[in-house]
Image: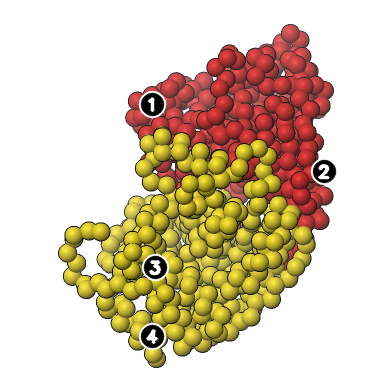
Chain colours: A yellow, B red
Amino acid sequence: MSATPTTAVTTSIGFTELVTLLKDIFSRHGASPEVARVLADNCARAERDGAHSHGVFRIPGYVSTLDSGWVNGQAVPVVEDVASGFVRVDAANGFAQPALAAARPLLVAKARSAGIAVLAIRNSHHFAALWPDVEPFAEEGLVALSVVNSMTCVVPHGADRPLFGTNPIAFAAPRADGPPIVFDLATSAIAHGDVQIAARQGERVPPGTGVDSLGQPTQDPKAILEGGALLPFGGHKGSALSMMVELLAAALTGGNFSFEFDWSNHPGAKTPWTGQLLIVIDPSKTAGQDFAQRSQELVRQMHAAGLRRLPGDRRHRTRANAEREGIRLDGDELARLRELARG
Amino acid sequence: MSATPTTAVTTSIGFTELVTLLKDIFSRHGASPEVARVLADNCARAERDGAHSHGVFRIPGYVSTLDSGWVNGQAVPVVEDVASGFVRVDAANGFAQPALAAARPLLVAKARSAGIAVLAIRNSHHFAALWPDVEPFAEEGLVALSVVNSMTCVVPHGADRPLFGTNPIAFAAPRADGPPIVFDLATSAIAHGDVQIAARQGERVPPGTGVDSLGQPTQDPKAILEGGALLPFGGHKGSALSMMVELLAAALTGGNFSFEFDWSNHPGAKTPWTGQLLIVIDPSKTAGQDFAQRSQELVRQMHAAGLRRLPGDRRHRTRANAEREGIRLDGDELARLRELARG
C-alpha cells in the first residue's frame, strides 16, 4: 500500500496458513482442539483486519496465561437454556469465545423466534477484540450488541483510584449494499492493547488518556502500565457507560467484576476472569421497510453529510488487501510464532 | 438548601398539585385525558428531581407543538404483540410516553417470561427526559436500557454537516440498599435543553460543545441554536454511539431518522417525530448471587474508590427535598403555567 521504507523485513502469510500456525501454538500450550480452533480463527481475523493490538501481538500473552494454569485451555462450556430469550453459559474457567461458539446456535434460534435474545457468559476469559463476536450476527441479518468487562485499570470519573476495566462495547448491524456496520469501542480513553503497543514502540499516548501511579496525568504509556491507570473516554458519560458494562457483563451474568479476581498466585496470568453479555435482535420483526435498506439509507446520509470513513471501513479495506496479498507480518514476529508452535 | 439571595421570588408547590396543573394545561391544549395524565406526571417528575431542562421549562414547547397540529394529543397507541420477546407500538403520531404506558404491562410480562424483551415505538414524539422511562423498571427489579433519536442538530465526528439528533441513552438497574442506579446521557456533548437554558440565562457553553452556522467552534449557545450545531461527546466514540441510537430507535422501530421529518408546514412544532427502543431484562434469570446484591457491591466499591456521587444521586437528593418542602418554582413561571391552564 505504501512506499515507505521500513527497517524490519516484512513477509506475508495467507489467512488459512496463519490460522493453522496459531492453532498449533494454542494446542502446543494446552488448548483442546476446539478451543485452539476458535481462538486461532479469532486472532487471525483480527490480524487480517489490521486490528494489531488484538492480533498476533496477543499470542505471547495467550501462551503465558495458558502456561500459568490461570485459564483452562481444555474447558468445556456448559450451555443452559434458561428461558425463551435467555441463554446462560458457564465457560468453566475457559475462554469466552468457545463459550460463545457453543451457545451460538441456540442464541440465534431464540433471537429469530422471540425477536430478541440474551447470552450471559460467566466464568470466562476474554483477551481478544470484541467486534469479531458481533460481526457474524450482522452477516446473517441480525443486530448484535456485546459488552465485556476486564480488569481494574480505569479510574471512574470523580474517583481517586482505578476500579473499572477498559470495558468495551461492540455493535453490529446489517446493511443492504455493503458489509455490516460494526464498531467496537473501549469505554476507556484508549484500549489497553494500544497502551502496550505505544510502550513497546516508545510513543506517547494522547493527553487525557491516563494517570501515573500518583494519580497525576501522564502521556507516558509505561507510567500508565507500571502502577498508573487509564481514564474513561468522554468524562462522566464514558464512566457511566463503563459502570453499565460492569453491571451487564458481570452482575447480570454471574461473572466477576473487574476488581474481583486475584491472579497473584499465577505468575504469567494475563487474561481477565470475568463475564460477557450479548444481546441479539431480529430486525425482521420491525415494522415497515426492511432494516438493511434503512441502515443503508443512514450510511448514504452520513456520506452526504461529509463523512468519508464509517466505523469499520478501514478494517474492511485492510481485509480486502489481505485477501489479495496475504497478511503482512514482521519476519522476526513470524519466526517467533513458528518457534512457539514447536516448543 | 442554600442561603444565596435570589432576585426572583420563588414559591413552592406540591407534586400532586403540580401534576394537576400540568394536566389542565395539556387538556386545555388538545390532549386526551390519558395523554394529559401521562405527560403531566412525566414532566412533574423531572421538575421535582431538579432536571430543569426537561421540567416545566418544556411546557411552552409542548403547548406550541400541540397548538400547531404537528402532534396528535388525542392519539391512541396501537400495541402489537409480535413475538415472545418483541412488542411494537404505533404511537399514531402521538407522544412516546403514552405509547410506552400502553405497552408496558405486555413488555414487563414478556421480559419476566422470556428473560428479555424489546419494545419498539414508532411514529412517536419524545420531548422529555429519558430516565423517567427506565427508572420504574428498575424499581420493580428489572434492568432497562432505552434510546431515542431526535432531530438533526449533531455533526457526526469527521463530517461537515449536522445529521444525528442528541440521541440519549438511558439505563436503570436495581440495587439492594438504595434507589436504582440510573443514568441518562445525551450522545451530544451537551443536551439540547441545556443549550436553550444557557441561551436564556446568557451563559456560555463549555468548549468542544458546538459549532456556529459556518461550522466554526463556538461557546455561544445562541450561535449553536441559530444555524449552528452540536458535536458528539467523546469524539468518534460518542459519534458511533449516536449512530447506533439512530439504528436502534429509528431503523429498528420503523420510525423516522432524526433527519427525515419536515415540520416546516407546522409553525410552532417543537417535537421530533421519530422512534424509541426499550430493552428490558429480568435479572432473576442470572446465575449465582442476586443481581441487586451484586449491583450494591459495585456501588460499595465505587464509593471505596473515592467516588462521592453516583449517577442519579443528585436527582434523588433533590427529590427527597421536594417531598419534604415542595417543588420550588419561580413565582412568575408558576403564574405563566396557571395562565396556560386557563386559556
- The chain carrying label 4 is A
Depicted A15 relative to depicted B273: above or below: below
Where does label 1 land, which residue?
Answer: B212
Q: Position of residue A22 (x, y in %)?
A: 43, 79
Give the residue type at disc 1: Asp
Mark in front: 1 vs 2:
2
Q: Which residue is mark 3?
A: A47
Hey, which quadrant is residue B217 in on the image? top left
Disc 4 and disc 3 on one polypeptide chain = yes
Q: Chain of mark 2?
A: B
Q: CA distance from mark 4 to mark 2?
A: 57 Å
| Chain where mark 1 sits | B
Q: Name the secondary structure under disc 4.
A: helix
Q: Are marks 4 and 2 in contact (CB under 8 Å)?
A: no
User: In the image shown, does B161 or B291 lie closer to the viewer?
Assistant: B161
Q: Residue at x 44, y 29 (%)?
A: B229
- SS at circle 2: helix
Q: CA distance from mark 3 to mark 1?
A: 41 Å
The crowd level at tag 4 (other Cα within 10 Å; few <14, some 14-19, many 20+) is: some
Question: Which residue is pictured at 64% across the width and 56% down the height?
Answer: A280
Q: Where does label 4 land, which residue? A: A340
**Which quarter of the rendering shows the N terminus of chain B?**
top right
Labels 1 and 4 share a subunit: no
Distance, label 1 to label 2, CA atoms, is 45 Å
Task: Name the kind of residue labelled 3 in the image.
Answer: Glu
Q: Nearer the viewer, mark 3 or mark 1?
A: 3
* Residue count near mark 1 (Cα–Cα under 10 Å), binned few <14, some 14–19, many ≥20: many
Q: Which corner quadrant holds the C terminus of chain B?
A: top right
**Where residue B134 appears, x then y in whole percent?**
70, 43
Marks 1/4 in contact by CB < 8 Å: the verdict is no
